[in-house]
Amino acid sequence: MALIVNGIEAPPPADPRVSLLDFLREHRGLTGTKVGCNQGACGACTVIVDGRRVLSCLTLAVQVDGLEVTTIEGLGTPGSLHPLQAAFVEHDGLQCGYCTPGQICSAVAMIEELRRGLPSNVTADLTAGTIAATREELRERMSGNLCRCGAHNGIIAAIEDAFGLENAA
Amino acid sequence: MTPFTYARADAAEQALELAGGGARFLGGGTNLIDLMRERIEAPAALVDVSGIGRTIEETADGGLLIGAGVRNTDLAEHPLVRTRYPLVTRAIVAGASAQIRNMATVGGNLLQRTRCTYFYDVEGSRCNKRVPGEGCDAQGGFNRIHAILGASEACVATHPSDLCVALAALDATVHVEGPQGAREIAFGDFHLLPGDTPKRETALAPGELVTAIELPPLPVAAHSRYRKVRDRASYAFALISVAAALRVEDGRVAEVRLALGGVAHRPWRAHAAEAALVGAAANEASFLAAADAELSAAVPLRDNGFKIDLARRTIAAVLSDLSGVGA
């Protein structure tokens, strides 16, 4: 078996102790994914596995053997930014940038959750087919990604811009 | 982490075989991997069961059978859960972060460790869960987040799950398979109070695997809430949480289910409050009196006395909300 990392097959590590985070960074050289708390509290290590955002620090690489892993390097390149990457630049969605890859991977998968109607803690009607992408919803849904620089306003603005969401400024 | 072997199982029987009675079962890993990295847990073998039981099926009697491998997100999202057991969806989305909910399994949620900051402080603190008999530094320490009900000298930690509070209110049943065969455990019997053996947290026998959670058909659950009070608006453990379902007839409580989170070593089904409520007038005075009936047994520690009043007011607020009388 193999993991499929950004479309490229990668044999799983021999040692099952290797986290998906360390596998990406140390074994695959994909250092875009960041080591934050390494204990599931900050979201800096967020990657997308089979379309879902997960924490790579609390995932063993062997657990996702056979699955598709998308990291920040798989979303855009310096010459061809993902629309959300471009929007982060435009809206100052960062200061130091350390949480940014996790924020962007998280938001890309978050939009899919919102569009398919997954409720959140602030969704009033659990039976609603569609959920409005209010700022309250976006903030709640992004609460697993901390930004110590406090760039959250820019992050939310970037998400709204990149995904064509209309909220009063 | 200390070295371990890893194997993935595709079915419960295979998982039991692979485990041979000695391995730890791995679900989403959101608690166990963290504890292994902290060297609080050091299993020699892991059997990954996260691919087993990924379905939610309606039972013949109109309940739901939820496979242990169902991800928290999938349970919260399921249309029958949203309409018939909205407190389950509410409890799940109140917990952790979206990333963790995508990873976490229902079975693993039940089996996350009951824990506190002293439990995690391997180098600096005594903890009877880590080293039975060495003492509990939370007893005389910073214990603002700790238990007010059912605690012991040995342990004052609280169970952190939100989902389990909803399951406690619903009289769920836990399906398990083990070396001695399959059995069912009533949810109220699944998690244990700490007593003198806080390291033991569930009624599972060695080698037993949770395979499913069954929700009984329960019409009152369609009218239910989960409210979580915490130090920040999102992504934090509960100081107090309340899961409740309520049916009012002619101004009186006809049927009620009530459970509390953040108060004890296990999800706390509020039987005393329920007994006080049935037949009572559906008004705030009754709700507060019922809360008092439950909380009369509460024992505050140095820093957590505020939880008693917070629980009282939250219970009344949730019941008021459900009964439409306003809080």
Image: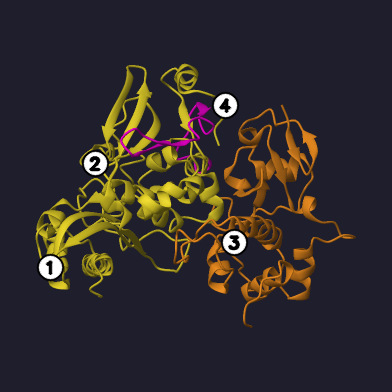
Amino acid carrying label 4: it is Tyr
Chain B, chosen colour in render: yellow
Closest to the camera, between mark 1 and mark 4, is 1
Name the disc covering residue B188, or none.
Answer: 2
Which residue lies at the image location 78% right of the left edge and 75% below the top edge?
A90
Name the disc covering residue B6, or none.
Answer: 4
Amino acid carrying label 2: it is Gly
Between marks 1 and 3, how big is the CA–CA gap?
42 Å
Q: Which residue is mark 1?
A: B286
Q: x, y (%) of residue B41?
A: 45, 37
Name the disc covering residue A62, or none.
Answer: none
**For the residues bearing labels 3 and 4, Cβ distance under 8 angstroms:** no
Question: What segment is highlighted magenta in the picture?
Answer: B37-66
Chain A, chosen colour in render: orange
The local crowd at label 2, few if under 14, some if 14 to 19, many if 20 or more residues have their Cα within 10 Å, is some
Which residue lies at the image location 9% right of the left edge and 63% below the top edge?
B280
Q: Decide whether residue B53 is among the magenta residues.
A: yes
Secondary structure type for disc 1: helix
Secondary structure type for disc 2: helix
Q: Chain of mark 2?
A: B
Secondary structure type for disc 3: loop
Of pointers 1 and 4, the one earlier in the residue sequence: 4
Closest to the camera, between mark 1 and mark 3, is 1
Q: Which residue is mark 3?
A: A145
